[in-house]
Each structure stands twice: as C-alpha cells, then as structure tokens.
Amino acid sequence: MRSLAVLGATGSIGASTLDVVARHPGRYRVGALAAHRNAQGLAALCARFRPELAVIADPACVDELRQHLRASGTACRVEAGADALVEAASGAHCDTVVAAIVGAAGLPSTLAAARAGKRLLLANKEAVVMAGSLLKAALHAGGGELLPLDSEHNAVFQCLPRERGSLAGAGVRRIVLTASGGPFRGRSRAELAAITPDQACAHPNWRMGRKISVDSATLLNKGLEVIEAHHLFDAPAERIEVVVHPQSLVHSLVEYIDGSLLAQLGLPDMRTAIAYALGWPQRIDAGVGTLDLALARRLDFEPPDLATFRGLALAYAALRAGGSAAIVLNAANEEAVAAFLDGRLPFLAITDVIERCLDELPPQPTSDLAGVLDADLTARRHATRIIAALSA
C-alpha cells in the first residue's frame, strides 16, 4: 500500500487526487494533507482521510484548523508554515508526494520530496520552470522518480517508450503540446481590452483554479508547459511545438522519426492523468467516463495566435535566453495575474509586465535554491514597481 502526502489538498488537483484515492482504499492511504489557508476545507478532508499530519501553510490559520478538527473529533498532528510543508513532503509518513501547491510557494517542498527519494507526482509546473536543473539533481541524489500530473506532460509520458532515455535515443522527432486556446480563442487584442477576471476564469473545457485559468487565457500557461517539457524530457525548444486544439480531447502528441504520431486522448478530466501517475506502471480506474469518438465527431487543430496571446512567445524567449529568465517570467506573471484578479491591472497588461521584466532584468546564472529564490524575489519587486506605475 502506498502512503500519500497531498500538498495543495483543497485545490482542484488535490480534490481530483483524493477522489481517485477514495476509489482504491486497499491500494492507498493518506499520510499527510496540506493546504494554504482553507482551514475548514482541510479539516473536512482530515476527518475523511485520517492523515497522520495536517499542515496549514499560513500560520495565522492554525488555530482555526485545530478548532475544526476538535469539533469533528479528528485526531492528527497539526503543523503550520513553510518548514512544515517541507516536513510533509519529506517525512516517513509518505512514500508518494502529490505536489499541487500553486506557484513558486511549492518549490521548497517539491525539492524536499525529490531529495527524500519520494515518488513525486508533480502538478506544480512552476517548480520545474524555476529550478528544473535543481529538481533533476535532487531526484538523482534522492533516488526517487517523477511522474507529471499536467495532462499534457502526462500524455507525452504515456506516448514515450517505457525506457525513454533521450529523445534522440527514443527516435523522437518532436513533442507537440495541445492547448485549448482558452476562453478567448479567435478574439483580437482590441476585443480583449475590457476583459474581467470572471470572464478570464471561465475556461470552456477545464475546471481549474483562478490563477491557472488566467494563465490559460493568456497562453502563458502553455508557455510554462513548454519550459516544463524542456526539463522533463530533455527536449530543446525547437523540438517542442504547440498546437491549439479547442476540444481538449487530444492531450498531447509525440512524433517519431519514422513519421508516426502517437497521441493520448481522453475526456478533459484531470483524474485520468492523476490515476495514471498514481498507478504507474499499472493502470487503475479513475472514475472517468468513456470518450465516444463518434459523438465527438471532429478534432480541430490550428496554430496559436502569438500576436494576440503573447504569453507563449515570451515563454519561448525566456527558455532560449536561459539562466534566470524563466524565473523572471514566472515571478512577473504571478504578480501581474494577482494584480489583474484584484482589479489593479487590465488583462492585456499582464504580458506587458512580463515583457518589461524580461527586457529589464538580464538573465543571471542560478546554481542553488538561494540563487533561484533571490532571482524570484528580485523579479517580483521589479514587477510590483511596474504594476504600480501602470495602475497609477
């Protein structure tokens, strides 16, 4: 039986993971659950899954968590703060870690899980974007393994040979990541000038958190996935392509040198990717329905509109620039998206902030976590100044 730590348990990935886990009580147990500030939601999950450890990232919420646990008669150890997240990811209570904390906040615990030799089920793409080389080194040192939870990278993983090695050794020509196009596919920049947060978060196919929904609307999310694919599969930028597929039924493809193109298809439900990673190398029931191709009728593909949705082009530029450029890209985006969701920044200005940060902060080498976090903080401060000027 595998024992899980679910970091980001009250978010959409956490909920989907626990739904799959509940379907297999003889295969999985929950050793630790962690959330950011949702004390009530975390307490409810603890009452259901009975972990050894419950972690609330915001220490201001720990008393509320304890109150809810007492009210439900749930006994488990309670900890709070960043160090507690690291403990949840690396302790003896788990052999498998679901890393689903959104943004840069998930990096330390993700690295801790890798160093501790855990099976790492990774949904936190920002950790790879910011510190891909550090994460791979930590996995090598700890002797653990990484399985991607992003539907696109999970699809690529499924389409590659079991013994993957390098892309060249596997006979792979290119990786093709699919993008839904988000809620504004087909619109011009002029039509996007007055977009509201609620409109940007209304994804046509996927149910996601607000931050990742906005990233999908700008195509920056797909750009982060390009950088993630570069690190996960040792693929250079020129061998990672993006195609818009509005039905979100083909989750990604791998083209081989003989002309074969292998694709992974399924309904747009994250439980498929999660179940594949949880059960690997076996397959387990995910609770997902059957994709009826006759009912779907058509699969459309088109190139991305890089002029209107500049997030993807900026990500490719950051990947090619190397050094700290991807850290700057991610930090500037997180600050700009937060400002947009708070009503302090218009939708189109999100990529303006990112572009200015990339232009004004030349790439620097980063060789350790301290360097990564310093570059991240520098970029956030710079983005904050730009946002303040644009909002004035």
Image (cartoon, rainbow, N blue to C red):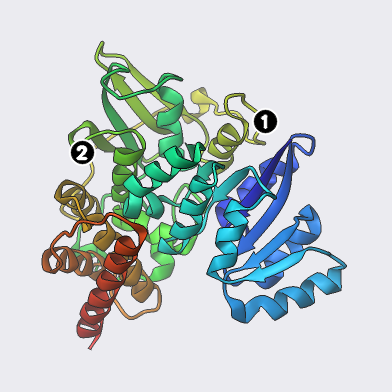
Q: Are marks 2 and 1 in contact (CB under 8 Å)?
A: no
- Extreme-top residue of the structure: 258
Q: Which amino acid type is shown beneath numbered disc 1?
A: Asp
- Extreme-bottom residue of the structure: 392
Measuring from the top left, give residue 169's x and y in whole percent: 29, 18
Report the front residue among 79 and 340. Answer: 79
Q: Which amino acid type is shown beneath numbered disc 2?
A: Ala
Which residue appears at 40% of the width and 69% of the height?
Answer: 197
* Quadrant, the N terminus: top right
Q: Which residue is mark 2?
A: 237
Tell me where residue 328 sits by quadrant.
Answer: bottom left
Distance Cα–Cα, label 2 vs label 1 = 35 Å
Q: Please tell me whether residue 219 is drawn above or below residue 136 in the rendered image.
A: below
Report the front residue among 183 and 23. Answer: 23
Which residue appears at 27% of the width and 77% of the height?
Answer: 381
Q: Please tell me whether residue 199 is drawn above or below residue 313 in the rendered image.
A: below
* Among numbered discs 2 and 1, the one appearing first in the sequence: 2
State the SS at label 2: helix
Seen in the image, is 67 located left or right of residue 391? right
Which residue appears at 15% of the width and 67% of the height?
Answer: 361
Measuring from the top left, give residue 371's x and y in whole percent: 29, 62
Using the image, tell me which numbered label, if any, was put on residue 285. Answer: 1
Seen in the image, is 387 located left or right of residue 270? left
Q: Please tell me whether residue 180 is drawn above or below residue 86 in the rendered image.
A: above
Using the rendered image of the protein, determine whether residue 248 is visible from the camera's viewpoint.
no
Measuring from the top left, give residue 229's x and y in whole percent: 33, 39
Measuring from the top left, give residue 216's x and y in whole percent: 36, 54
Using the rendered image of the protein, determine whether residue 60 is visible from the camera's viewpoint.
yes
